[in-house]
Image: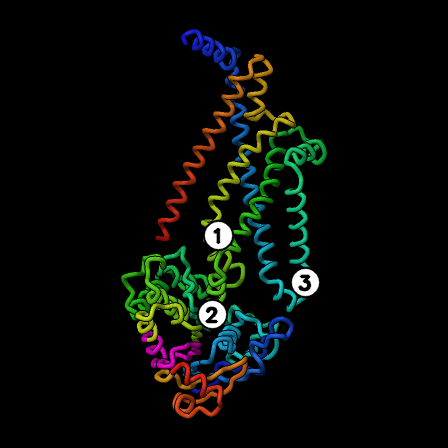
Amino acid sequence: MNGETLLKVDNLKKYYADGAVKALDDVSSEIKRGEAVVVVGPSGSGKSTFLRCLNLLEMPTEGHIYFNGVDIMDKEADINIHRQKMGMVFQHFNLFPHMTVLNNMTLGPIKLLKMSKEEAEANAMKLLARVGLEDRANEYPSKLSGGQKQRVAIVRALCMNPEVMLFDEPTSALDPEMVGEVLDVMKELAREGMTMVVVTHEMGFAKEVASRVVFMDRGKIMEQGSPAEVFGNPRSERLKSFLAKVL
Amino acid sequence: MKEWLNELAAEFKLNFIDDDRWELIVEGLKNTIIITFFALLIGVAIGVVISLIRSTYDNNKEDYKRKGGVGYVIMSILNGICNIYLTIIRGTPVVVQLLIMYFVVFATSRNGLMVAIICFGINSGAYVAEIFRSGIMSIDKGQFEAGRSLGFNYIQTMIYIIIPQMFKVVLPTLCNEFIVLLKETSVAGYVGIRDLTKAGDLIRGRTFSAFMPLIAVALIYLVIVMILTWLLRRLERRLRKSER
């Protein structure tokens, strides 16, 4: 299974204001099973737009996205089915405030995967224990710290048993002392072989975890390669100046 | 002082005890509550449907246009109908609507109570719809995205995630609409329905004493509104507890 193409992006374009703003300007890429792709770049470079296009939270203007070989931008494709297999973690957690942590996690499995309540809860508790939050299962999200919220958001996505996890700046809204606990969970996920696409400003994480680093600027993929190549031997001037600022 | 009290007692007897006139008040109160309650049910039902159509259309306009076809046409027509409904209902006085309902639309029906329920229900539906819609709009977009990213479709996301949160946000405004509706039903007398206000007015007409029956009616409205306000506060406090 590992190594086969899971996500394929062909000539993806996302224009705003009738083409005056090119958030994504002809991006093509391929993400293989088991890969941990980390997307970096200056703000406004289109990296978040790229990620959000992968599960069509943003509708690309042009291009194709193949997930497991199926063109999900096709009019006939049922995006809801595909999204069940693509977990997403947001910058602002987006936990459901009117539900307990446990209900946040079991809503999807019960309603969409038609799991029994017992099974979904047992599964959720197992995942909560893995991120050390089993004692918070019956709390409401507002009682949790930012780091705890994000860990819950990650396991909420994992409850759906996804084939790929998309992370949209998962640590950007966190207090510095909470960044570590979230990154640790993500590192563990990567080690277990979860396919991940991560948009982040955490260069340390990128160096340590990424199987591939993608540098984006002005809506284009400027450079990509192993962390050693991208961080150790940047070719373009833009990447050099970007790295000089963030490292 | 004693003389004044005696006079008051005599007035009270004349207006409420003689000829069992208090029964008019009780009957009126009953009708007022019936009209308000059922009109509210109709109003909330209409409100949910209209607010869903309108916010669905607003949120998915791009998507519908892209996919085109029947879905887009149906949604555009539904949205148009909703807008016409809102404009007409909010643009005309409720008394006029009631008169039209009673003497034109349901001209053959002599069931005033039913006509009033339908009329006030349709009227309140327009206001409730806008309350719900603003409630839906006030929910963070991230909630919506989180629901969709799990794989819920638009309707499921609305039902499981957005509407429960929306209800909490709009509850105070919704209860306020309920209170407004209760007081608005006082114009039902225009088409001969014996609601609370009409009952007070009937007594006034028979006893030629205005003070007692009208103040009594006012007090009854006031007490009901105060009870509703008190219940609302308790409800709000309980809802808030679940989040903190």
Disc nearer the start of the sequence (3/1): 3
User: Can you tell which mark lies on residue A61?
Assistant: none
Drawn side of residue A234 relative to residue B79, left or right:
left
User: Magenta segment range?
Assistant: A184-205
**Residue A187: percent from left, percent from top:** 34, 78
Q: Quadrant of residue A197?
A: bottom left
Drawn side of residue B192 relative to residue A184, left or right:
right
- Residue marked by disc 3: B70
Mark 2: secondary structure: helix
Spatial CA distance of label 3 from label 1 is 29 Å
Amino acid type of the residue that numbered disc 2 sits on in the rendered structure: Gln
Q: Which of the two marks, 3 or 1, is nearer to us in this view?
A: 1
User: Can you tell which mark lies on residue A84?
Assistant: 2
Amino acid type of the residue that numbered disc 1 sits on in the rendered structure: Met
Q: Say which chain tag 2 marks.
A: A
Q: Is residue A233 magenta?
A: no
Q: Quadrant of residue A63?
A: bottom right
**Residue A228: percent from left, percent from top:** 38, 90
